[in-house]
Image (tube, rainbow, N blue to C red):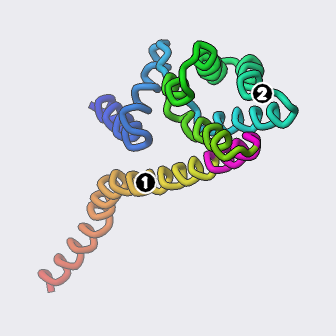
Amino acid sequence: MTGLVGILVTLAVLLASGGKGALHRRIGRVVGRRVDDATPVVEIADVAELLALSLASGRGVTASMSVVAERVGGRLGQDLAMVVAARDWGLPDDQAWGLVDPAWQPLARALVLAEAAGVPPSTTLTAAAEDIRRSEGHRLDVAVERLGVRLVVPLGLTFLPAFVLTTVVPVVGALAGSVLAG
């Protein structure tokens, strides 16, 4: 019986901490199966800064994207290489960036904005990286606040009845006994 209660409490905490996606990822790790996560947004900000540095050194946009994709590697490098390949095949920028995770859109908008305004893309990429970090920090703050609220309910449902049974009931019983006896 206690094992079942333990399992239910564990599932409730996992669901409260990150929802179904977090539970799915944790179960995938336990079972040994890889579960694809979303593209890490903060790492995209790092890629934007690397692109800005490469562009500031005098490389073109496509050449910079190729170099950064090669150096970054992993999923981010693959996504960036896919955009480079799509651009090489002649796809417009919006379609090329549409092939990768939507988390790349701030970077894509920064490049398109720089081209339209005729300014160096390194400036807009640096600003985009700052915006990405700021919005991700805000998203994490909101998630932490929600977690605090979600944790109050299970704690209230477990500790409040225990408090009533161990403190209030004996005091009321003792008072009722002394009043009825007297």
Q: Is residue 162 above or below residue 12?
A: below
Q: Nearer the viewer, residue 3 or 110?
A: 110
Q: Position of residue 9 (x, y in %)?
A: 35, 38
Query: What residue is drawn where x is 70% and y is 18%?
Result: 73
Q: Is residue 25 above or below residue 45?
A: above
Q: Secondary structure at mark 1?
A: helix
Q: Position of residue 90 (x, y in %)?
A: 58, 17
Q: Is residue 115 above or below residue 145?
A: above
**Separation (CA) of disc 1 from disc 2:** 44 Å
Give the residues drawn in magenta, as a range.
120-132
Report if residue 155 is visible in the image: yes
The image's mark for residue 36 is none
* Corner quadrant of residue 4: top left
Q: Position of residue 25 (x, y in %)?
A: 45, 25
**Residue type, label 1:** Arg
Which class describes the residues within 10 Å of circle 2: few (<14), some (14-19), or many (20+)?
some
**Residue type, label 2:** Gly
The image's mark for residue 60 is 2
Report if residue 37 is visible in the image: no
Which class describes the residues within 10 Å of circle 1: few (<14), some (14-19), or many (20+)?
few
Query: What residue is drawn where x is 82% and y is 27%?
Result: 59
Q: Which residue is mark 1?
A: 146
Q: Nearer the viewer, residue 142 or 78?
A: 78
Q: Position of residue 30 (x, y in %)?
A: 47, 19
Reading the chain from its start, which is encountered first: label 1 or label 2? 2
Q: Residue furthest right?
A: 57
Query: What residue is drawn where x is 60% and y is 21%?
Result: 83
